Image: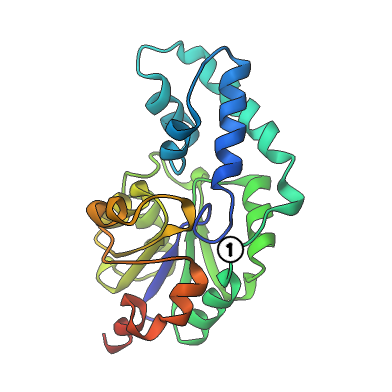
Amino acid sequence: MDRAAVFDVDGTLVDTNHLHVVTWWEAFRQAGHDVPMHAVHRAVGLGSTDLVAHLLGDDRDQDQDARLSAAHTALYGQYFDRLPALPGAGELLRRLHGDGWTVVLATSASGAELGALRRAIDADDAITATASADDVTRGKPAPEPVEHALELAGVPASRAVFVGDTVWDMQAGSKAGARCVGVLCGGIPRADLEQAGAEAVYADPADLLARLDGSPLGRARRW
């Protein structure tokens, strides 16, 4: 296996972005902050601290950051036993693994949340490793999560494709030097993903799987 397929998880393989929107919105509301849901949606994909800073600004009371994150975690945790995989997610990972790809996850989730996401995908037999929030000092859009995933795969960026659903994903993958593929199932417009670095964009994992041969992941077989 000399090529890596690196995947974001939330909004890319598991249909969780809008759960994050609602639970972050409620965490902010409980702390006295009026943050519009559309703004929260655009920030999903950032790590907790970066998401709070992005939405509340650098002049916020940073002593609240940990409490906001804990409130979001508690609210979101209510859904751990019923997180829905996106169509074709597990099948796509197993197909790529069968085709000789090293499949690695790169996600800001960790601990029990990451475990719940992996159970939803139900393709552990195809996943070689996971780069989680606990493994890096800076999350997306910094390249560190993707770079660490490539280290785990033992594959250079020139032989990797990164699949994600947010502009933060596309920026991180591009900075890491990987080819980037976007999916629309996280709710971010095609034009935004392309502007941030997506070489190709698909509706969801099932769409990517159905058109795999003509995708960057299919063309990469000739590397």
Which quadrant of the figure contains the C terminus? bottom left
Tell me if 16 is positioned left or right of 1 in this view.
Answer: right
Q: Is residue 17 left or right of residue 211?
A: right
Residue 173 is at least partly visible in this image: yes
- Within 10 Å of disc 1 (Cα), the crowding (few <14, some 14-19, many 20+) is many
Q: Quadrant of the N terminus?
A: bottom left
Residue type highlighted by circle 1: Leu
> Is residue 102 at least partly visible in the picture?
no
Q: Quadrant of residue 5?
A: bottom left
x then y, percent, for residue 76: 66, 38
Q: Tag 1, which secondary structure?
A: loop
Tell me if residue 219 comes above or below residue 42 in the rendering: below
- Where is mark 1, residue-wise? 86
x 41%, y 58%: residue = 164
Q: Is residue 49 above or below residue 102?
A: above
Residue 61 at what x, y percent from top left? 46, 10
The colouring scheme, among rainbow, by chain, secondary structure or one colour, is rainbow
x then y, percent, for residue 94: 56, 79
Nearer to the camera, 178 or 13: 13
The residue sitting at 63% across, 71% down in the picture is 123
At horizontal 48% and vertical 58% (from top left) the residue drawn is 185
Answer with the quarter of the image where residue 146 lies.
Answer: bottom left
Q: Position of residue 77 (x, y in %)?
A: 70, 40
Residue under the point 52% across and 15% down: 33
Residue 140 left/right relative to 115: left
